[in-house]
Amino acid sequence: MQRLETVSYMYDRRVPTRRSPAPEERRRDPERTRRLILDAASAEFGAHGYAGARIGAIASRAGVNVQLISYYFDGKEGLYQALSAEWAERRRDIVPPGTPLPEQLRRYAMEAVHNPEGARLLAWNGLEYTGPDDEADGQERHERMLADTVAELKAKQEAGELSKDFDPAALTVMLMAAAMVTTTLPHVIDGVCGTDPTSPVIVDHFADQVAMLAKAIGL
């Protein structure tokens, strides 16, 4: 009989009853609460990717009840989409219209210092990509973002400023990969260059090198 009571107790602990946020939780400053959740989600997604991130861990980081994430964002996917929308807004701040392409690349590379979780999240998107039908990583949004750069490179080719030997789409991808190298290949930087890839000085150095490369090929 005691064993049955123990099993029942363990089962109850494994499957807690879901509840709505308590009244005092709803009375919190909603913008502050949303900000806490978004910041915690950025750190959790950046550390573990979309698949590995846990709602409970995000709630713990934010210091809120897990039900508030569903209340404000309708769960994990809605929270991820909110972060993706914030990245789109941040991109406009990083590279306002008219920013020269070499400077765009330099600024994107510096995101490893200014917004490391965002840079890591973008890298995770690639690691978790499963094909054209994958919507979790915001693939369509990224394609729209990079289409502007491809169009700019095509215009430079038509103006005779960039060799027609380059494939504008392939070149865009290569330059993007170069700008993210301190996030995606830190072990290679450490092994080849013998430097700390997380150092702001080193990131700044690589950012300048990427911009220099863009200028060297006519951008």
Image (tube, rainbow, N blue to C red):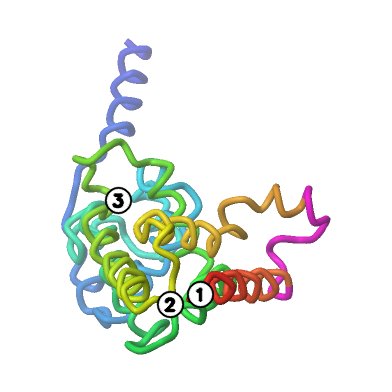
In reply to whether residue 200 is colored magenta, the answer given is: yes
Distance between mark 3 and mark 1 Cα atoms = 32 Å
> What is the secondary structure assignment of the residue under circle 1?
loop
Of labels 1 and 2, earlier in sequence is 2
Q: Give the position of the N terminus as an image quadrant.
A: top left
Q: Position of residue 182 (x, y in %)?
A: 62, 60
Taking the view exactly as shown, the residue that stands out farthest to the right is 194
Q: Label 3 belongs to which residue?
A: 137
- Type of residue at label 3? Asp
Q: Label 1 belongs to which residue?
A: 218
Q: Position of residue 209 (x, y in %)?
A: 65, 71
Residue at (66, 53) in percent of width and height: 186
| Relative vertical location of residue 33 with respect to residue 121 in this rendering, above or below | below
Q: Are marks 3 and 1 in contact (CB under 8 Å)?
A: no
> What is the secondary structure assignment of the residue under circle 2?
loop
Of labels 3 and 1, earlier in sequence is 3
Q: Position of residue 153 (x, y in %)?
A: 36, 70
- Type of residue at label 1? Gly
> What is the secondary structure assignment of the residue under circle 3?
loop
Categorize mark 2 by other alpha carbons within 10 Å: few (<14), some (14-19), many (20+). some
In reply to whether residue 139 is colored magenta, the answer given is: no
Depth order, front residue of 9/134? 134
Quadrant in the rendering for residue 198: bottom right
Distance between mark 2 and mark 3 Cα atoms = 34 Å
Of labels 2 and 3, earlier in sequence is 3
Quadrant in the rendering for residue 173: bottom left
Q: Are marks 1 and 2 in contact (CB under 8 Å)?
A: yes
The residue segment tinted magenta is 191-201
Q: Label 2 belongs to which residue?
A: 161
- Type of residue at label 2? Glu
Depth order, front residue of 69/154? 154
